Image (tube, rainbow, N blue to C red):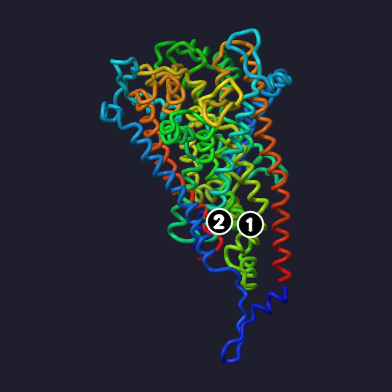
Amino acid sequence: MVDSLISGIIPLKNGMMAIKMKKGSSHMDKIFKYVAIGAGTYIIALVVMIVVNLSTGSAQVWQQEGIGFLTGSDWNSVEGRESYGAFPYIMGTLVNAGIAMMISVPLSFGIAMFLSELSPRLLRTPLAMVIELLAAVPSVVYGLWGLLVFRTYIQDWIETPLHNLFGDQSIIFAGTPFGLDILTASIVLAIMIVPTIASISREIMLAVPNSQREAAYMLGATKWEAFRIAVLPYSKSGLIGAVILGLGRAVGETMAVTMLIGNTTGAAAIPTSLFQPSQTLASIMANEFAEASQGGLHLAALVGIGLILFLIAFLINVVAHLLVARVVKSHEGAVLA
Amino acid sequence: MITPEQRAEFRKHFRYNVGRRLVLDKIVKGIVFACVMIAIIPLIAILVNVFSNGAGALTWEFLTTVPGAVGSDDPGGIGPAIQGTIVIIGLSSLMGVPIGVMGGIFLSEYGNNRYGRTIRFLNDVMAEFPTIVIGVFVFVLVVLTIGDFSMWAGSFALSIVMLPIVMRTTEESLKLVPVTYREAGYALGIRRWRVIMTIVLSGAKNGLITGILLSVARIAGETAPLVFTILGSSQFISGLSGPIDALPLRIWRLSSLPYDSAVTQGWGGAFILIIMVLSINIGVRYIFLRNKEKTFIKFRKQGRMS
């Protein structure tokens, strides 16, 4: 150690000594920096490549159908009579995700409020962990459980009574309750996105300074009032971001929905009733992929649906992250450079 | 500032109807507690169902043999699926982890500028992305070009899924290492890249391992990208190309078969998958939670000594 230090001391002309301690050339620093920048750039390259590849892969169907691919509702893969329209699946995706959001948003806000405001300190960490474990259960396991267990309960306890009560006259409860339909898929989807929304909302509520709550308590507010007048206004935009993030996940969720939604194609998939089998953008890709022959129009149509899903999900995620980032400002590097 | 008039108004507001307000408070607390219960019930139900139905399917044959012919008396096992999942996790970690860690280093050490913020943002967006779109993308890019489904295509797709998670957690854990550590390194005359590779990375080791393991748990359960890239098969891996099988994919295929034996096997597969995923998650959280506190205490002590 000392030897290397001494050998690094270089006498200079004017009698001063400079210690040459930096070993190796400065090129290594530059190379390392560029490798790191390259790894970061890989993400941008991936996003660009996804757009380019999905566009070229689906060019055939856009040429053939034009804008009709977005608005049409035919779906026929018989050779010679091929015709593709994604409208029913866009609607199916939106309705399915919408119902799931209606169920999961109040639930998640309740959980987040419990974890950030009411929970005893002892319960807080284990409960947050349980919620995060819910998020870790693979999608296909939710699907299997929904298909083999949950479906029969839904069919016997919810759908049949509702159907008997309102009958076929009411539009949203029309159709034979079969268990594999929009309602079942939405409820399982809701169970799946609760952890996402709940854990982000909790973080956002915890980011509200305690002085806000204390001020409300000082005025004599109850817990709920303190939450309403101090926490909610402060975290509003972040909570909206959390909801939109959950929406992004709901829109892209594939396996569980594919196993539960019943999978019809064409105009029959346009959702009108809760008890009606339908189809989402993600589920039709997973279902029909095995049947599509390489290089055919059918495959191009499925890739085109992938492009539509990409654009919807990208838009949702960008908006959500802009809203969340405004509240939770942990998004800076460690080193000021 | 709150004016005296406002204060009087607040007081009046809060004095008004105390009994009703307390009742409302109780009601809201009850609703909130019910929300928590409702959210926990599915988790318990899923765990109970998977464990009770899946444990019965577990035999040595089930874990090691190839699946039998569809509908035949001999249901066979899920050996190829387990093998495929392990191989794919290994390969995609090889592809995803180095790039993810380097990307995290970029975000934390060089990323305090406009370019860094752009990448951080895109990374966050990618982390929540529909994985099926990634599957279609890899299908168009790799499978159509090469002309065959392969484990490489599947691993590439899963490496894209795990990349943002690794990058994010790497960045977060590198940021926990105090800047003074880096400065101490510079003061000793160590070059920046050596400081990062030795001092900063070893300080952030626990966080790094946590991130990598969590991302492995995530991709172990991914199904959608695999549908498009490895297709599924009922044989053990025989070569570098050609379709292979994976656990989630096998569960999906089994669930669509109308036989009791297939259903039992599906539960068995789900049992193994959920044990894998949850043990990684719980284990990592347990170790990390303990070590995180230790790390903070370590850093605090050393900060005070300096």
Callout 2 touching callout 1 (CB < 8 Å) = yes
Q: Chain of mark 1?
A: B
- The residue that mark 1 highlights is B201
- Disc 2 crowd rating (10 Å Cα; few below 14, some 14-19, many 20+) is many
Judged from the image, the secondary structure of the residue bearing numbered disc 2 is helix
Quadrant showing the C terminus of chain B? bottom right
Q: Few, some or many C-alpha atoms within 10 Å of disc 1 (few <14, some 14-19, many ≥20)?
A: many
The chain ID associated with circle 2 is: B
Q: Residue furthest bottom?
A: A14
For image coordinates 67% across by 19% down, the residue present is B65
Q: Depth check: give the residue in front, B202 or A185.
A: B202
Classify A81 as above or below A96.
Answer: above
Whether callout 2 and callout 1 share a subunit is answered yes
Residue B248, horizontal then vertical, whole percent? 58, 27
Mark 1 is on which residue type? Leu
Residue B128 appears at what percent x and percent y? 50, 40
**Vertical placement of A185 versus A112: above or below?**
above
Amino acid bearing label 2: Ile
- On screen, residue B266 versus residue B304, left or right, reads left
Q: Residue at x 50, y 36 (%)?
A: B157
Residue that badge 2 annotates: B105
